[in-house]
Image (cartoon, rainbow, N blue to C red):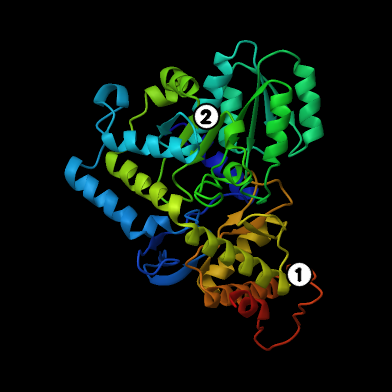
Amino acid sequence: MVYRRYFEAAVARLKDERRYRVFVHLERDVETFPLAKWHRDDGAVDDVTVWCSNDYLGMGQHAEVIDAMVDTASKVGAGAGGTRNISGTSHAIVELERELADLHGKEAALIFTSGWISNLAAISTIADLLPNCVILSDASNHNSMIEGVKRSRAERRIFRHNDLAHLEELLIEAGDRPKLVVFESLYSMNGNIAPVKEIAALAERYGAMTYVDEVHAVGMYGARGGGICEREGVMDRIDVIEGTLAKGFGVIGGYVAGDSAVIDAIRSYAGAFIFSTALPPAVAAAACASVRLLKRRTDLRAAHQRAAHITKHALAAAGLPILENGSHIVPVMVRDAELCKAASDLLLTRHSIYIQPINYPTVAKGSERLRITPTPRHTHEHIAQLVEAMVDVWHTLGIAFAEPPAHLHVDHKSDERCTYPEIKLAAQ
């Protein structure tokens, strides 16, 4: 093909910049997760431990969620049959939207095929329906939010990450114009949490509409899994809450919840919704089962937080350079693209541990990392194996250690296997 060289050159540039992405062929197992089968290029199949799944609570393997999917598929089939306008709205989606509206204390909810699409469609539609709107967007917002902001015809201004003073400055500059503040509750790469109360208060003071992405928090925070805004008691002060069904809830799909007039307007004007085939009923039923379960399963949220806490403390005690935050995300900083990829490869080939490298453009150059996400299914033995493996990889590749907390000392020069007393202490 005459144009082939352009595509080959584009891929070559990514490889030269050390940011070409390689997919690892994995097959999860319902019974043994976080173990999975690694199908190697040479045809061999090995067991590996997955430490970077966004199925944070393991709901993708929950028996009730699976049963809901299987039962619905056996009754109504595998597909949706088309868009909701063409083929009608499945009963499973109607039930799911009701559950999500209830979860967030809102009048209505609307389902999309993914969280990326829900942000793209909802932000751009809301902003375009507000006359002379100005969008105020956090500098660290996810790509899907950035694309939604760009897609809109509205003016856009960026405020420094979680910087309330800068946000207030921009709100004042916008004057009496309609204003839309878009931000995340929990930022997935650093794991830090937004000051949602303070942002809500500023928006109220200056007459702005608020739109929050709770993708990495729904199911996992709050009394019923409504996210950071539920935990902080501000769901009623946020105009539109966006979430996903693919992370804490373990299935797939995105959604927005809010005032019925806002949701109806998005439904009626967003092309990405109108012209997209609906979620299959079986998928919606599985997601609905997961949402219902997590409204009452505070024990799963507690187990998840314990696993994250123990993992962070064990890594820190071993001198691994974790990025401190107040969430379940555990970023281990490498700060070099080649070393980050090498560390990921060595963990997989030498220690049968899968953690994908996070490089540019997902994170800024010089902030490359391994992003670890513990689940309730990661045991103390899994955690100990992870820490020992990462210490070995850090030594092998010459990656700098951080200073462990003063009360927990690890001798990295010792040939003996390290033990991590905080794992035992945290379990008591």
Name the spot of residue 355 as percent of width and height, x first.
55, 62
As drawn, which residue projects farthest toward the top? 131
Q: Nearer the viewer, residue 168 or 70?
A: 168
Q: Is residue 60 above or below residue 36?
A: above
Label 2 Cα neighbours within 10 Å, binned few <14 / some 14-19 / many ≥20: many
Q: Amino acid at mark 2?
A: Leu
> Which residue sits furthest bottom?
416
Where residue 401 is drawn, which disc sits there?
Answer: 1
Give above or below for 202 relative to 49. above
Gap between marks 2 and 1 measured at Cα: 40 Å
Compare marks 2 and 1 and give the one earlier in the sequence.
2
Can the viewer see residue 165 in this picture? yes
Quadrant including the C terminus: bottom right
Circle 2 sits on which residue? 120
Q: Is residue 182 left or right of residue 242?
A: right
Which residue type does callout 1 highlight? Phe
